[in-house]
Amino acid sequence: MECYTGGVIRPRRCGAHLRIFAAIFAFACLPLSAGTASDLATAIRESTPDRDECYRVRDLTLVKDELRIYLTDGYLIFSKPVAGRRVSAIFTTQVENGDAEVILRPPNLAERRSLASFIGFPTLDDHFRAAVFLFTGDDYQTLMSQIPNNPANQKSAEMGALLESEWTPALRNISASYDTRLALDLLNVPARPPGLFLALIQSPTFGNYNLFDDPENPDQIAAGQYTQRNNRTFFDIWTHFPARAGRSREPLGLQLTDFRIEATVEPDLNLRAVTRVKVKTAVDGIRIVPFDIAREMVVGEVKVNGMPAEVLQREAPQGNFGRGENDLFLVMPPAPLRAGVENEFEFHHSGKVIVQMADRILYVAARGNWYPSFGPQFATYDLSFRYPRDWELVTPGDVVEDRLEGDWRITRRRPSAPIRLAGFNLGNYAHAQVAGAGYVVDLYANRALDPALQPRPTLFTPPPQSVRGRSWTQRLPLPEFSAPTLDPLGRLQRLASGVGSALEFMASKFGPPALSHLSVSPIPGNFGQGYPGLIYLSTRSYVNSSRGRAPQEEDVFYDDLLVVHETAHQWWGAQVAGASYRDDWLMEALANYSALLYLEKNKGVREIELILDGYRAELLAKRDNGQPVDSAGPIVFGTRLESSLEPRAWRAITYGKGSWILQMLRQRMGDERFLSMLAEVMKRYGRREITTEQFRLLASEFLPPKSDDPKLELFFDQWVYGTGIPTLKLNYNVRGKAPSWKVAGTLMQSDVPEDFSVLVPVEIQLAPGRSITQWVRSSNEPASFSVSLRQQPLKVMLDAHHGVLRR
């Protein structure tokens, strides 16, 4: 599920774009000798260096697969034990000629290019001043075992006292940021083995940056840095890749099913809820269970199988209100969970996740994370809401109960099939409904106009005029009637009919939608989201602001593309899901291209060609370094692409290049094969997750016989796993006479690496409406081709139908 923001599409499924990096922190653990979760977290936050465990050291080494850290000469001090284990250390080069070095070489070209884009080099080889290490594995033992190997390595109590005083604030600050994460590791033994390693490096060359090694994650190794740009904070992920040793472990396998949620929206808009859900794990003996919830929500009482359980939740940062981001919290059941055994969890949680934007206009900040979850999973839901009777509630599913009780209204809905997450919306709405074969669309609109869309008086300066020999100017407001009248209800029925039409079109291509009942409701702002059975649609899409003038690109986006794109998520995202952040591009690209197919049906081929041209322009726009936006990284980098170097890259590449990738596959396959391929994706992976490689193999089944690149390996290497947009030039001549003609030509390629190669369609028109297509493979050398014909061609054209993304 995605979020459009003023033409910029931002991920909201897991909160902010930094959420994807939290996946690096998977679930490692260590033995715990004593203390509850809260006690342990407090001990972690109050960590201090241990002056009695400070050493002057030389030539110590930590090897974490591709990550190597050399403590050449300096002081190493460990923290005091937490639950009997030392889980952090500090190294500093505060000696004459002190030195330390970190070396990290990503194993593939894409990751080396990513690293080079941030630090200027494809390998990180950095001599640093100081570092703080957090670890839950055997790193303490590894370092201590090396100390006796060199007579120069000795304890230094005097330096220990100094470092304890100097580094205690920094260690506590860093430990407080990871207290919940470390507590999770430390409590889950013997069920989960240890292994997390985190280094915060202080470098004179690159500033402060982070290194990670987590064997619980399929991509164990990562490096990145917090950066500020234009008053925004980014976490730039320099590189993220699997270790060669392949240390990934059996996943926690936490499965949540059968959600039953009873929620109350108070008159002051505070949300109180009780969530009951069935939970089981694939790992035996889990002592503490991780969950996510919006930072605004406070989790109070929790019961597991009817017995009280301990909750560990960090206090939400100040100033976080209304951001809707996720936080990790932990639940410690009264007894360890057994593998495969279903447990009943009951959460009591509350918070301000609804914001009043204006009179009678509300904004739900936490749309998919207002209740406890563990990543989006297919589950059944039963949703009951109690709220003031003068509001109207929208949530997915069929109505089970809807009644008034004094000043309250009580609505209960139950989706007819498993869904991945349940949103809700609340407002003072007008309502329209359309129904068709197998579906119902309820569309809601604010009765009042979003203040952000109110026409504002515009000042203008008329040209100088002479009045009795004097020059003057006067500032006047434009007459109010010169601005279009914006009516939030004006497009109500038209929008409802449009969604119904889009549903019918896509159902005819891909099968039934996620739920037969779809609700569409407004949300202030310039974005949209498509949840199962519920669409959040920008208030901008409810008004026709182009009335009285020619529609602009922005108008096409809000009036046509946005609502259809979100409707398409009833298939791509709501039924088929990406398996990881590297695969989420598929859901956005498939939803966006499905919307283009619908626009093509209603407005013609030229309409989507213009949109594709716009995407190409965004991909070729220049970055600060003079390179095109496309060079920011391959599409499988996902939200890593939205970095301080190029905030536009994620949107341009995921939606724009993703749509081009599907357009190129369509041109290779032909319409019939392409649409059959999309239907097969839904058939094979409905209510399941799909990887990019699974999509490649499935798509290759629908290529025409004897196709070049029959497994689409080269195609995916260039367009999915790589970057580059070629400049192509065609030279040709036509020779012969009836009935023997020959077209001979040369295709030349530039502006891409030497190993870049794509199939390019050359269309030879024989008569009006009749042509043949010759596919020519480009290379760094001119590619020659010839075609024999029985009649003289009328025209020879390079890529006449947007068959390849090119300059």
Image (cartoon, helix red, strand yellow):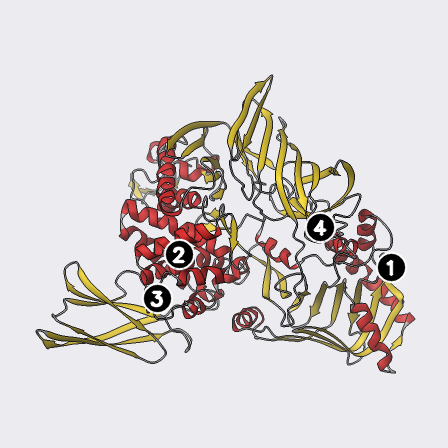
Q: Which residue is mark 1?
A: 84
User: 10 Å neighbourhood of mark 1: few (<14), some, or many (≥20)?
Assistant: few
Report the side of 642 relative to 285 (left or right): left
Q: Residue at x 34, y 74 (%)?
A: 778
Badges 2 and 1: C-beta atoms under 8 Å apart?
no
Label 1 and label 3: CA atoms lie apart by: 61 Å
Report the side of 710 relative to 468 (left or right): right
Tell me if I can see residue 715 in this picture: yes
Mark 4 or mark 3, which is nearer to you?
Answer: 4
Residue 176, x across and y down, in percent: 76, 54
Task: Give the label on residue 659, or none.
Answer: 2
Residue 230, x across and y down, in percent: 55, 56
- Badge 4 element: loop
Badges 2 and 4: C-beta atoms under 8 Å apart?
no
Q: Nearer the viewer, residue 762 or 156?
A: 762
User: 10 Å neighbourhood of mark 3: few (<14), some, or many (≥20)?
Assistant: some
Q: Earlier in the sequence, mark 2 or mark 4?
A: 4
Q: Which residue is mark 3?
A: 806
Q: Residue at x 48, y 52 (%)?
A: 685
Q: Earlier in the sequence, mark 4 or mark 3?
A: 4
Above or below, 648 relative to 535: below
User: 10 Å neighbourhood of mark 2: few (<14), some, or many (≥20)?
Assistant: many
Residue type, mark 3 in image: Arg
Label 4 and label 1: CA atoms lie apart by: 28 Å
Q: Earlier in the sequence, mark 3 or mark 2?
A: 2
Q: Nearer the viewer, residue 154 or 383?
A: 383
Residue 388, x across and y down, in percent: 58, 24
